[in-house]
Amino acid sequence: MEIKTAVFAGSFVSQAQFPKDHLPEIALVGRSNVGKSSLINCLANRKALAKTSSRPGKTRTLNFYKVNNKFYFVDLPGYGFARVSKQQKEKWGKMIEDYLQKRNNLVGVIMIVDIRHLPSEDDILMYEWLKYYGIKTAVVATKADKISRGKQLKNFEEIKKALGFHRDDYGAIVSSTSRQGKNELLKIIEKLLET
């Protein structure tokens, strides 16, 4: 698969606002500041399609990106961000849960984890939740450029073990900076779209 066009389609907070063109959607989930927006930019070959920030909690809405006029990437707010109120966390949690549970166009989720760290409690809960609802998932370990190749494989195996990785799910090691693993992830996205 090659991404030739990618455009920002809008930021939304409820089902009533979502695009109505019935195209398939692939959601990106992960902790705050794990690199969801950077990954979208990498896959789309665009530097600033998805706004990135070194400040966690930047994404506060569901951001839709139309790709090749055939599907959407949906960038969800990061979870586990400590510097927001409990009320705000609950609001984001409800918004994310409603989307993942009720959106018929959703064909798969790219769950992003930082390859340098074991999954957080929130990561494990998210993965278990996705499996409970039978959502096809690709676990993608980002920031691979920050550690050696040898350590990448070891860390990724530990991450998958900690999550209780299902063998029917997909996995990839990626760096948005060096583009390592980009083509492999595009192939996984193609498979998610076929289901």
Image (tube, rainbow, N blue to C red):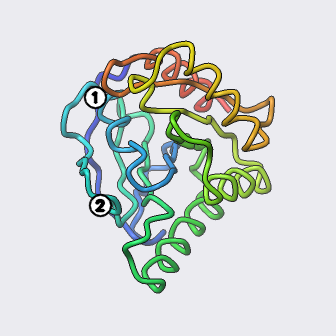
Quarter holding residue 104: bottom right
Disc 2 vs disc 1: which is toward the camera?
A: 2
Q: Residue at x 63, y 28 (%)?
A: 156
Residue 55 position in % (x across, y down)? 27, 57
**Residue 15 vertical placement versus 113 (above, below):** below
Residue type at mark 2?
Answer: Lys
Instruction: Say left or right for 97 vs 157.
Output: left
Q: Nearer the viewer, residue 30 or 98?
A: 30
Residue at which label 1 appears: 5
| Labels 2 & 1 near each other (Cβ < 8 A) | no
| Image disc number at residue 117 | none
Q: Nearer the viewer, residue 183 or 179?
A: 179
Label 1 crowding class (10 Å Cα cut-off): few <14, some 14-19, many 20+?
A: some
* N-terminal-most mark, 2 or 1: 1
Mark 1 lies on a secondary structure that is: loop
Label 2 crowding class (10 Å Cα cut-off): few <14, some 14-19, many 20+?
A: some
Q: Residue at x 66, y 36 (%)?
A: 159
Which residue is the extreme one toward the left? 48
Quadrant of the snapshot with the C terminus:
top right
Q: Residue at x 61, y 53 (%)?
A: 120
Mark 2 lies on a secondary structure that is: loop
| Image disc number at residue 58 | 2
Q: CA distance from mark 2 to mark 1?
A: 24 Å
Q: Residue at x 48, y 69 (%)?
A: 15
Residue 42 position in % (x across, y down)? 32, 28
Quarter holding residue 139: top right
